[in-house]
Amino acid sequence: MTSSLEVDTLCTSPRAANRFTATSKLLSGTRTVSAAYGCVAMVLPRPLPTPVLAFAVRHLGADAGVMVTASHNPAQDNGYKVYLGGRAATGPGEGVQIVPPADAQIAAAIAAVGPVLEVPRADDGWDTLDDGVLADYLDRAAAIVAPGGPRRLSVVLTPLHGVGGDTAVRALAAAGFDRPYVVPAQAAPDPDFPTVPFPNPEEPGAMDLALALARRVHPDVVIASDPDADRCAVAVRDPSAATPADPEGWRMLRGDEVGVLLGQHVIERGVDPHGPHAVLARSIVSSRLLGAMAEAASLPAAETLTGFKWIGRVPRLRYGYEEAIGYCVDPAHVADKDGISAALLIADMVAGLRAAGRTLLDVLDDLARAHGVHATDAFSVRVTDLGLIDVVMARLRATPAAEIGGVSVARIDDLAEGAGPGLPPTEGLRYLLADATRVIVRPSGTEPKLKIYLEAIVHPNGDLAEARAGAARRLARTKAATEELTRV
């Protein structure tokens, strides 16, 4: 009943006539409770991707939206996302996930609710939307693809047992692309996720079936979404990764690689630096390369705390991403990460490059030559006792590291005292080493683990391969040392 109480909280605010958009996965109590408090609940016609809900909040002028989803977590997990819009949030915060103080206010109101059986309910007062809202979302998503561009493209697609498969196939068709090869065993929604322990494209093994299909059908690109389709992962052929079992060398691109590729595509398509949507944004744990690209293009850039509840509310946002394969490519309409529209923009980019005899790897090479190799890595320290995370963070603060991996620490930023200009405090530590390598240590906001993010920058001196090798050595050395620092 948590979801019902949450909606009840939104409806018992001073805006008693507020409307909210919800998914059909919400408990039936959501609708009956909201109706009893004078709200109008608009329920999506069936289980649909989270980006469709984020779109609907703005598109329908709703005051709030609720999505029940475990996103990319294991089958036994569940959760929900809350968006505010309409009269509840305006300006850059319209249609964005909640941030303080709204989260605390909602939690306090939930705590004040009495026994669930005493919560008023009504027999009617809600609307089940038809497919018009999905059609409008698909029209908008297809519009981000450049008209008249190349459309010859072969795609392998997997929704990882989630709700994004049909929507992604329809979006590709609406944009003029051929029907993708969809991984059969992962095509239909299945909350048990029978082929993967973690339905997250970043997890080992999650992409095995998609890559196996790619080796059979030889597509131009492999695209995956997580189960609620707000994240997008990409795999490409990489000759340097070829093996006898995989002569094409299919490999997953890192989230930072996809992030800067989409950023470059946005830049190349033209951004007015003084226009209403001009800012390129990234989270503090994402690669600094996007900032360098923005500076070179004379575009404003922003750095935010992790999460699209922060990225999505950046004023004048044109594009934003975070390294955990989340990309906001149409913030004027979906102020959140959107795996469907990101997939379309990747398809648009790959098709254009294919027509020119180039690949995504060629663009990554161009960016490395222009701005330096920005090599990133990340790892997690999982715990069974959340208190152990506090122990590690306290130890790191009590005994500040003077060097990491043999390189002196130039600066340590305690993010709890402020993450940067205009950013609120957050739990974490940021280390900047003398060679510009960066280390960030922070607790996960959604899982029982400590997350560590690494980035090394090496500027090529005529030899890109050697620069990449040098960056890889720095990362490996830094990772080994940081693993010791954060050992539980």
Image: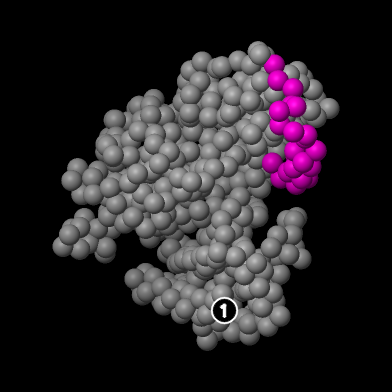
- Residue 116 picture quarter: top right
Using the rendered image of the protein, determine whether residue 378 is visible from the camera's viewpoint.
yes
Q: Please name the colour scheme applied to the rendered image.
A: one colour
Give the percent coordinates (x, y) of residue 128.
56, 17
Crowd around label 1: few <14 · some 14–19 · many ≥20 (10 Å): some
Give the percent coordinates (x, y) of residue 451.
55, 64
| Span of residues in magenta | 98-122
Residue 114 falls inside the magenta stretch? yes
Give the percent coordinates (x, y) of residue 305.
65, 55
- Residue 218 picture quarter: top left
Using residue 46 as the reference point, say whether residue 242 is left or right of it. Answer: left
Using residue 401 as the reference point, say whether residue 324 is left or right of it. Answer: left
Give the percent coordinates (x, y) of residue 231.
48, 44
The residue depicted at 60 percent of the width and 39 percent of the height is 80
Look at the image and tell me in which quarter the C terminus lies: bottom right
Using residue 6 as the reference point, say whether residue 256 is left or right of it. Answer: left
The residue depicted at 35 percent of the width and 33 percent of the height is 188
Badge 1 is on which residue? 485
Residue 311 falls inside the magenta stretch? no
Question: Which amino acid, mark 1?
Answer: Leu
Front residue of 167 and 363: 167
Instruction: Kindly give the residue lying farthest to the left in the view shown.
Output: 244
